[in-house]
Amino acid sequence: MRTIAIIAAKEIQEGLRNRWVLATTLLLAALALSLTFLGSAPTGNVGAGALDIVVVSLSSLTIFLLPLIALLISHDAIVGEMERGTMILLLSYPVGRYQIVLGKFCGHVLILAFATVIGYGVAAGALAISGAAVLAASWYAFAWMIGTSIMLGAAFVAIGYLISSLARDRGTAAGASVGVWLIMVLVFDMALLGLLVVDQGKTVSASMLEQLLFLNPTDIYRLANLTGFNVSQFSGMAGLAGSAGASTLALLIGMALWITVPLGLATASFARREL
C-alpha cells in the first residue's frame, strides 16, 4: 500500500509540474462560472431553482469534457513510460507491475477529483454569495453530481490505462483514445436513437433500453444526474425519468464496474507485456 501511495504522489507531482492540475482546474472553474451565471437566467420564467439549473448545465458539460480530459492524461501512462525507457528503471526497484498501475491510477483520479471539486465548488460558492435561494435538495443533487462526475472520470482513466497497456506506441494510444471518446460520447447514443427509430417499439422495450444504457458509462452518468432528484423536469429527460427503473445502488454498481473491469484488464495486460 505504501508503494502505491508513493507512485500516486509521484504522478501528482508530475501533474503539478506539467501544469495539468492547474489547467484542468481553471478550465472547469471558468466553464462552471459561465454556466452558473448565464445558464441560470431562465429561472425567473420557469420557476426552477438556480442551483438545479447549474446541476443540469454542469452535468451536460461533464458528459463531454471530463471523459476527454481523463483520456488525455491517462492514454500514455504505461506506453509513454515504456517509450521513454523510464519503465525499465522503475521496474528495477522492488515494485510489482500491479502496484505501478494502481499507483498511477490513484494519482490521476486524485488530480481529476481535485479539479472537479474546486472547479465546480467555485461555481456553487459564487451562487451562494450572490444571495440566490437554494433548497437543501438542490445542494444534495449538486453533491451527488460531483461524486458521480469523479466516478465518470475514474472510469475513463481506467479505459485510458487499458488502451495504454495494449497500444504499441503513444501515437496509436492517442488515436485510439480519441476514437473511444467519439464512440462513447457521440456515436453510441446516435446509434441507439437510430435503433429506436427503426424498431418503432416492436422489440426494444423500456426495460431493454435501460439495460442498453448500462453499456456506456456516460449514459449511466446521465441517468444518475438528469433523471433523478428535482432536476429531471428541467433537463428535457422527464419522459425517461418517468420510465427509468434503475435504483441508485444499481447505477453506482454500474459505474463501479466501468472502473474496475477496464483497470483489471489493463493490469493483466501490462503483467504479460514484454518491455
Image (cartoon, rainbow, N blue to C red):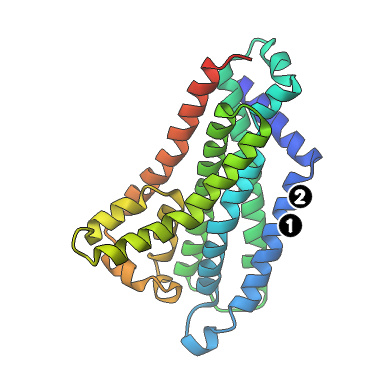
Q: Crowding at label 2, few (<14), some or many (≥20) Cα neighbours within 10 Å?
A: some
- Give residue 242's position: percent from left, percent from top: 28, 69
In-front residue for pair 242/1: 242
- Give residue 171's position: percent from left, percent from top: 67, 36
Residue type highlighted by circle 1: Leu
Q: Which residue is mark 1?
A: 26
User: Quick one: quadrant of the N terminus?
Assistant: top right
In-front residue for pair 78/23: 78
Q: Is residue 261 left or right of residue 120?
A: left
Residue type highlighted by circle 2: Leu
Q: Quadrant of residue 131?
A: bottom right
- Give residue 173's position: percent from left, percent from top: 62, 35
Q: Is residue 265 left or right of residue 36?
A: left
Q: Is residue 161 left or right of residue 232?
A: right
Q: Which residue is mark 2?
A: 22
Residue ranking furthest to the bottom = 45
Going 52% across and 64% down the picture, which residue do you hit?
60
Going 26% across and 59% down the picture, which residue do you hit?
245
Q: Describe the element under mark 1 as helix, strand or loop.
A: helix
In the rendered structure, are the residues bearing label 2 and label 1 in contact, judged by CB atoms less than 8 Å apart?
yes
Q: Quadrant of residue 176?
A: top right
- Give residue 111's position: percent from left, percent from top: 66, 43
